[in-house]
Amino acid sequence: MATTFTKIAEDAPPSISIDTDRVLSEIKDEIYSGFTEHMGRCIYGGLYDPGNSLSDENGFRTDVIDCFKELNCPVVRYPGGNFVATYHWYEGVGPKDKRPRRPELAWDGVESNEFGTDEFMKWCDTVGTKPYIALNMGTGTLDEALGWLEYCNSTRDTYWANLRRENGHPEPYNVKYWALGNECYGEWQVEQLTKEDYAKKAYQWAKALKLLDPSIVLILCGELGYVEWDRYVLGECIKWIDMHSIHVYTADKEHMANASGPLSAERAIEICASLIDMARIKSGVTKRPTICFDEWNIWDPVRAPGDKGAEELYTVSDMLAMGVWCNVFIRQSKYIGMTNIAQSVNVIAPLMTTPTGLVKQTTWWVYLLFAKYMRGSTLGVHVKSGTYDGRTNPVFIESTMDVSWLDVSAAINNGYVNLAVVNLNAEKAFETELKGVPIGQEVEVHLVTGENLDDVNTAEKTTVEIQESKWKAESKYTFPKHSFTLLRWKL
């Protein structure tokens, strides 16, 4: 475990011990990757808003691009999500006036196909990020998937590669990451599959795709990471795949159930890592696929329905949940190959566009601090703290782990130690003994909090943002109630 824990009495003083000799595992830059889907205002009005004064000559929102650059976002997943199960990529290339408008079944809309593969590749190039494409394993065919791969990556004198050249793109895009479908297990999917049918199909698709381009990274469609679907499809397909996907969303109306919900992802990662090893042992495969957590976020579908655009307004409680989500990924960096926040703009997103600007939600500021500083390698930490003993969502959290009032991770990067601490307690600040911080050292303090748990940021008012200060290190530091704190100091 990267962060170990000892439960203490509620009235006992908490402590955090940082051991800079315990450099545990690499934090892959890809854990700060994004996700854009043809859903609500994510693409149209988010990434792509032609005619707006904030858009460039390609119709791309420059303020959104600047934010992706600020995050140093390495990979962006596209075009879905549930959308991809009825999406035919070849309808979104070529002259825009000849692209067909189609019913969009996942989110009850109409797809104009005005923004397609070539536009997305251009956008990625502008941002300085790498594309990750999800294949249509619903209404799509293997032949269609091979055509998409050929269009994007082939240098040969062949049909789809030549079509790319005719469309004005002589050089291949060299798309590295490809997903074998999206949530194919779900009853909400067009052409839902059983685990047996999916595994058989994924095995054959993976084999063919690797024949066409052996250099690609294939991501298997997992579920929650700890259910029978995951065990079965890993067991059948481990030979061909490079990553296994997990999708988890958390939310609750009550603060502690909401803010502690991301701890379920920690158990999901740990169990899924064991399922991967079990499949490897059974099959004799020596390579170890990593986990691709390619959809995760705080999302209440009742509060923000998908067919209405899923535009969440995030609170301070949600901001704390974001801190726990990111701490989980740092603590579990040994197993994580990529994570993709779902989604990056407008749809359950930390960024919201308006006709005249951007709203940076409460969750943005925590995610930004992680993306800027929590890179490099995970450090070993030991936490002593009291615990929350009430209701959790999902329920299994309360019976499988302790929910510490102080949720902690640490990283070492470019000669700096970075300590990320979420104080989940809505009422109590914690004076905490810090072991491993040199006394007298100048420490950067990055604090994100609000006056109330339900504080939000809007176009009219920014209530929550980063507060920066310096601290001359002493033996104890007080973490304010319902706050996220990042402490940084030179090693």
Image: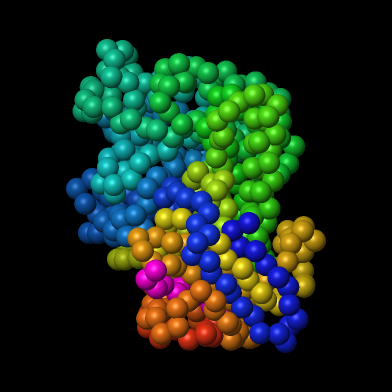
Residue 117 appearing in the image: yes
Magenta-colored stretch includes residue 481: yes
At 39% from the left and 81% from the top, the residue drawn is 441
Q: In the picture provided, is 465 more to the left or to the right than 155?
A: right
Residue 391, how many percent across, how many down? Answer: 77, 69
Residue 304 in the image: above or below residue 318: above
At 30% from the left and 31% from the top, the residue drawn is 173
Q: Does the magenta stretch mainly form a helix, a strand or a loop?
A: strand
* The residue stretch that appears in magenta: 480-491
Residue 243 in the image: above or below residue 313: above
Magenta-colored stretch includes residue 377: no
Residue 466 appearing in the image: no
At 67% from the left and 56% from the top, the residue drawn is 264
Residue 447, how many percent across, how many down? Answer: 45, 78
Q: Nearer the viewer, residue 92 or 126?
A: 126
Q: Nearer the viewer, residue 270 or 395?
A: 270
At 73% from the left and 73% from the top, the residue drawn is 7
Residue 279 in the image: above or below residue 203: below
Q: Nearer the viewer, residue 432 or 205?
A: 432
Q: Quadrant of the N terminus?
A: bottom right
